[in-house]
Image (cartoon, helix red, strand yellow):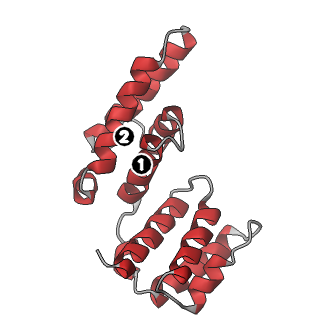
Amino acid sequence: MTQDESIRAALVEAIAWWRAGLPGGRELLAQTATDALAGTMDGFALVELACLRSSETAIAVDGVIERLVDEQYLRAKVDADLTPIAVRRVCRLVVSGRITERELVRWVHSAFGHTAADPELQRLALLDDHYDEDEAMGQDLTQVRHEIRAVAQRISTSPPEDLEARA
């Protein structure tokens, strides 16, 4: 993957994160745009995205994203279902220790319930139920956390098309 392809993939991932409504979306978009500018990319919408303020409305952010998508030729990538990209990023964050197992399963359960086509996402929703039960009963959460991390590891290292086909 070339540097430009890598930067474009990071931009698509940041857009997926934003559109999934996950925390820190504005900051991730701004940081990713800044990294792109520090790399090999340029463009007015990219600069605008890099300068996003935390008080920017969601409508304004979406407008900048739309201009960026056209400017950087990302339309085909962002018009596809971005859910698998957001899921993979959340799983990578769990594996790297940047978010907790609890945050992952709570988000998956709330976003997909028990109806996801992907068996790994269904497993995470079920593990959220187990986490709730074990926590309520005062049981050790080590095993359920270990299982969550194992699923997150599998998702984060699987080819994107695997999750796309099942999500």
At mark 2, the secondary structure is helix
Counting from the top left corner in percent of width and height, residue 109 is at 46, 37
Q: Is residue 142 left or right of residue 63?
A: left
Q: Are marks 1 and 2 in contact (CB under 8 Å)?
A: yes
Q: Nearer the viewer, residue 131 or 96?
A: 96
Tell me residue 139's x, y (percent).
50, 9
Tell me the quarter of the image containing the N terminus.
bottom left
| Closer to us: 96 or 14 | 96
* Pointer 1 local density, CA inside 10 Å: few below 14, some 14–19, many at least 20: many
How far apart, in angstroms, are the residues tagged by discs 1 and 2? 7 Å
Side of 146 where 21 appears, left or right: right
Would residue 27 be found to the left or right of residue 107 on screen?
Answer: right
Three-letter amino acid code at disc 1?
Answer: Arg
Relative depth, front residue between 143 and 136:
143
Asked if 125 appears above or below 84 in the picture, the reply is above
At 39% from the left and 26% from the top, the residue drawn is 146
Q: Which residue is mark 2?
A: 152
Q: For the point 42% across and 41% down, which residue is it?
A: 95
Amino acid bearing label 2: Ala
Give the mark nearer the N terminus: 1 vs 2: 1
Residue at coordinates 53% horizontally, 36% vertically from top-left?
100
Q: Is residue 82 above or below residue 140?
A: below
Give SS at disc 1: helix
Res 56 visible: yes
The tag on residue 92 is 1
Any part of residue 126 in sight: no
How many numbered tags mark residues here?
A: 2
Q: Is residue 3 above or below residue 26?
A: below
Q: Which mark is residue 16?
A: none
Answer above or below: position of 82 versus 147.
Answer: below
Q: Position of residue 18 (x, y in %)?
A: 55, 62
Q: Quadrant of residue 128?
A: top left
